[in-house]
Amino acid sequence: MIFDYATFKLIWLFLIGFLMIAFAITGGFDLGVGALLPFIGKNDKERRLIINSIGPTWEGNQVWFITAAAAIFAAWPFMYAAIFSSFYFALLIILLALILRPPGFDYRSKISSPGWRQFWDWSLCFSGFVPSVLFGVTFGNLFLGIPFEYDDTFHSYFKGSFLSLLSPFALLTGLLSLSLLLTHASFFLQLKTQHPIQDRAKQTAQIVGLLFLIIFCFTVYWTLYKLPGFQITFIPDINTSFSPLVKQVSMLEGGWIEKFQAYPLAWAAWLAPITVILGIILALVFSSYNFAAIAMVFSSLAITSVIVTAGMILFPFILPSSIQPNHSLTIWDAASSHLTLSWMFWAVVIFLPIVLAYTTWVFRVMRGKLSSETTLKSESY
């Protein structure tokens, strides 16, 4: 095979990270626009225009989320089984929220009743707000560790509850996710709409963008300096397939910052969180001068850097266990077979460029600002 087993494991870490970033950037402004709908749109015409801004592309953007889940199922089956059982209720709530999106887009304009349209407006708001928060809560719990363990037959058992996942730190990361996606969505609405929606989006971006910067700095400090971190003290040969139960893992005070600073060229590891801060600041500056497209570029860079920062802190862990640290999953021991990773890699090489080309073409066709006249001619959404 073209790569050895360990290399394929690293490749799939980057590929799944890429899928998460693609969904966060494209699906992120979809969710954020939905969450902002009742607040930035002050009347029915404005809300229909806001919905039309994401109407043609939101379904395609959701594909990145589905593809990421499928990739985790195929590349990291141990993680897929453990996280979908541990976060079952949270994922069910996310699913129910996302289910509201298709009827919200398709049926809102079928009846002219103000009550009917208001119901679907708030449904779309709910379907954007809840996933934005719970995705962040999920990531927050990865740093805390999930209360799960394996038995002798490799069945995972979740020892917590949905409420136990809503710790103060996890709720903070939920607000971090929400504020970031609302900022990104505000830039998108500023890019796609005209006065007065554009002005409200611009003002919203300044508020939630500054809120995000405060939350992000506090979250990074809390994670690196206050949370116990996971460290591997013994691991077998990473180039072979082995049981997740044979390594040794310790939870240490300041463990995350020690591991973060252990990278070669440790100073370079700080470039990711610094890029987040600079990206949002530059995005807010360009937004204030009505360069919304450039602001979108910098907010996309910030989103990418947030996920890269999280990945660098966690590496090589992908699902730590808080009650049985030795049962924590890493990219080395949660992966599928060498052959499976190889076949999937070639499928990605063939199909990912096609998907990227099509996505680029769609956004190119749909570029430009929406107007009230355009909205009045179409009742599609």
Image (tube, helix red, strand yellow):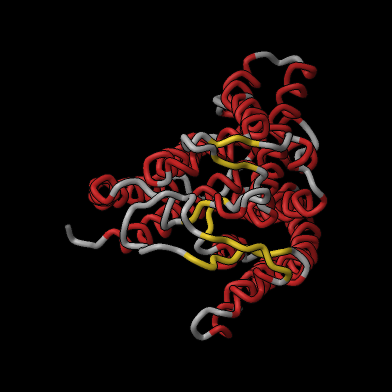
> x%, y% of residue 54?
57, 40
Percent coordinates x, y for residue 292 in the rendering: 62, 61
Q: Quadrant of the C terminus?
A: top right
Left of 348 or right of it: where is 25? right
Residue situated in front as seen by the camera: 355 or 311: 311
Front residue of 201/112: it is 201
Residue name at image x 49 percent, y 38 percent: 152
In the rendered view, would you say 117 is above or below 358?
A: above
**Residue at image coords 75%, 66%:** 213
Note whether residue 296 is visible. Answer: no
Which residue is drawn at the image coordinates 64% and 20% (left, top)? 109
Seen in the picture, residue 304 relative to 245 is either above or below; the reply is below
Could you say where residue 224 lies in the image, as x and y percent from the top left? 70, 70
Image quarter (top left, top right, bottom left or bottom right) of the N terminus: bottom left
> 248 and 165: which one is in front?
248
Q: From the top left corner, tell me how far across and down residue 195 is, in percent.
A: 72, 50
Q: Residue at x 42, y 49 (%)?
A: 243
**Given the current orientation, which residue lies at the most extreme front position?**
152
Give the quadrant of residue 371. top right
| Residue 220 showing in the rendered view | yes
Residue situated furthest left in the rendering = 1
Q: How many marks?
A: 0
